[in-house]
Image (spheres, rainbow, N blue to C red):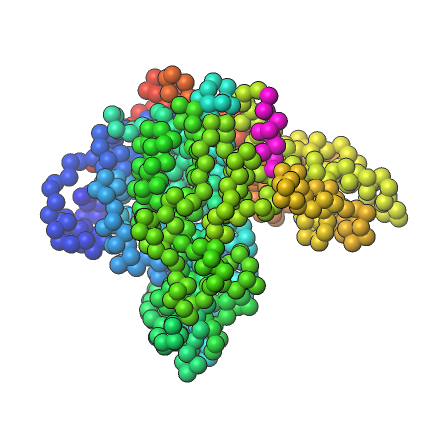
Amino acid sequence: MIICNGLSRACVAGLLLGVSLAASAREAVVQAAADIRRTSFGVPHIRASDERGLGFGIGYAYAQDNLCLLANEVVTVSGERARFFGPEQSTLEARNNLASDVFFTWLNTPDAVATFWAAQSPPIRQRIEGYVAGYNRYLKEQGAPAQCQAAWVRPITPQDVVKLTRRLLVEGGIGQFAEALVGATPPNVTASVPRDAKAFELAAAHQQRFTLDRGSNAVAVGRNRSFNGRGMLLANPHFPWIGGMRFYEMHLTIPGQLDVMGAALPGLPVVNIGFNQHVAWTHTVDTSKHFSVYRLTLDPKDATRYLLDGKSIALDKTTLTVQVKQADGSLKGQTHIVYRSQFGPVVQWPGKLDWDNRYAFSLRDANLGNDRVLQQWYAMNRASSVKDLQNSVHTLQGIPWVNTLAADDQGQSLFMNLSVVPNVSAAKLAQCSDPRAGLQLIILDGSRSACAWDVDPRAAQAGIFAADQLPQLERSDYVQHSNDSAWMVNPKAPLTGFSPVISQDNIGLGPRTRFALQRLQSLDKRRISVADLQNMVMDNQVYLASQVMPDLLEFCAKHLGADTATLQPLCASLQTWDQRANLDSGLGLVHFIYLMQHLQQTPDAWRVTFDPAQPLTTPRGLAIERAPVSKALREAMLASTADASKHRLTADSRWGDLQVSGQTPIHGGPQQLGIYNAMQTVPRADGKREVVSGSSYLQIVTFDDNGPRAQGVLTFSLSSNPTSKYAKDQTRAFSEKNLRPLPFTEAQIKADPQYQLQVIKE
């Protein structure tokens, strides 16, 4: 056990997770050691002889590059933001500190953390303990960087890694309802954490942005379509560029046991998206539901009791206490009560999920029972083929809220919509939900125990679907995914007939999916090359432009009327625009973004509506002949012209002048326009738009007789420390569309011109 703060061995064992006293009597742990070999852009290739040593190297390297980032996230998941920063400030996600603390204090109770830890295999525990030791060793040796030299930066524990993992698990469920959980108060009772209408507006926006901020594209090509008859994989996850979901690139090796390279989320000592000697894989956010809401029918005599099968049951009450920094710097404990039914915590969302004297709403998140997630990626890191990887997911079912796409050196490609999904059949949905609520939020009847999730003994967890009930597709041509349902992964083999909780068919496809399928179909007459996959991302085609530009230009030519003089510059910019989102793309792109944002909110704007029989080509065309559409388009054109003038944009303005990361111009654009290289931005005071999410770890992997051949880029660069030489170097490479070869073999690593070796020991 690493002792990083002078505590005795017994004290440290007690500090960790409340494990039994027997845990402190384990055999003495061999001191960890690791080699950290860095190559171009500072990418660490970490080699050790055992799990603890590997974890030690990962934690040390991560602290070198992102200590402040992880320290901040540890404060968040420990529910200590109000303690250190005060109750009025907010997290990076714009969540109020006090609400955040109450939520994470509820989520990461000592019992929940201890239970999760107890479920981990010895190798996972060793990896985590090593990670903690490595991070703490760096902090002790070097101290915190200037931007986070403060009391809230401390040595971490295995508890903290568990808390970070549990935060990841609920990102697709209760994590989106933190404000609703904290705000749930019986009628006529004053809330201890005041409700803030703005907070709920922000929460709603975050829910809508979840897939945008954590979306992704992926293509896995099989032997029949790849240039060399082996598998190929394009991984293009769209993830936040800041905070707790910011990927870290690394290569992990235990000689003779493990050799895997890719990207990992903060605090996780495993590769989430990557490749090894034989197989490459990636993830995309799925459309499956990972939670359901239960409408509780309340006891007419008491709004803190609910009726289940006619019996009155009291809601469980848990009192939480968080420490809050006062104006004078002192700390004061603030208590909050969380109510719970047998289904889960009560949530209250004004106007959506109201707690009155008749009803309350309880949320059940399937991933709260998922203690297999780290073991899942651990197994995937070691997979020897697509089939081996698939078997590990079938057995463990540890994937939280994403699909998995993979390809291997034998030329097999695979899609799996195989995550943790509540077992609610179509029949149960029909019997237990209100059809008026739709399918966006699954609301079940909480007054009948028959409406509880079904239990399949074959599933890895009670209440979720068994693996063989979920969509999956093996192909030797290709599979692809861009955050739509599983339906059109490959149009030659539609995936249909699943519970709507899992996947829906015969529904409209997003423009990125349509772009990808049409691009892949355009390559049918030849084999797919690495350049083809790279171009899908990097040529930045604006797919929707091909669907509506003829109508826009016709409107410009024939229907401007009295606004001709005002709108002619806009029309000229549309005419000359290259219909791409490159750095040198002109003002037409800016206007097009503005126009489509408004038109996509206009009813009946499409000339040809969606047709399930033609999912790849509908909807299309703008119905400019309809007066409401024509009116909306004219208004949008005038507003866009005024907006461009306000921001002093001219005919010479270029996209790279506007969309930036710091001072670096960034290509790509809004995914709603069918831009595969999706970027989400926020406005800056200087009129530019700062990238906050989008293409993140970009990886293209092929195989030959010698193993994997990979190239890629980490778009936001390795380090979040602005003073690091690795803070912007890959961002500049991405801006220039330069993917670099990823050194994987010993010869490739040592031949890298920036090769450097650091040996670290406990």
In the image, is residue 523 part of the stretch drawn in magenta? yes
Rendering quarter of residue 307: bottom left
Q: Could you tell me residue 26's position as x and y percent? A: 12, 45
Looking at this view, is 627 or 559 the one in front? 627
Residue drawn at (59%, 43%), measured in percent from left and top? 509
Q: In this view, does 72 lie above or below 221?
A: below
Rendering quarter of residue 518: top right
Q: Could you tell me residue 199's position as x and y percent? A: 51, 62
Residue drawn at (41%, 68%), measured in percent from left and top? 448
Q: Is residue 435 above or below residue 612?
A: below
Looking at this view, is 723 or 10 the one in front? 10
Name the quadrant of the C terminus.
top left
Residue drawn at (39%, 65%), measured in percent from left and top? 450
Looking at this view, is 336 or 282 the one in front? 282
Residue 141 visible in the shown view: no
Residue drawn at (47%, 33%), measured in percent from left and top? 235
Is 295 on the left-hand or right-hand side of 30?
right
Q: What stretch is highlighted in magenta?
A: 514-525
Q: Could you tell me residue 128's position as x and y percent? A: 27, 42
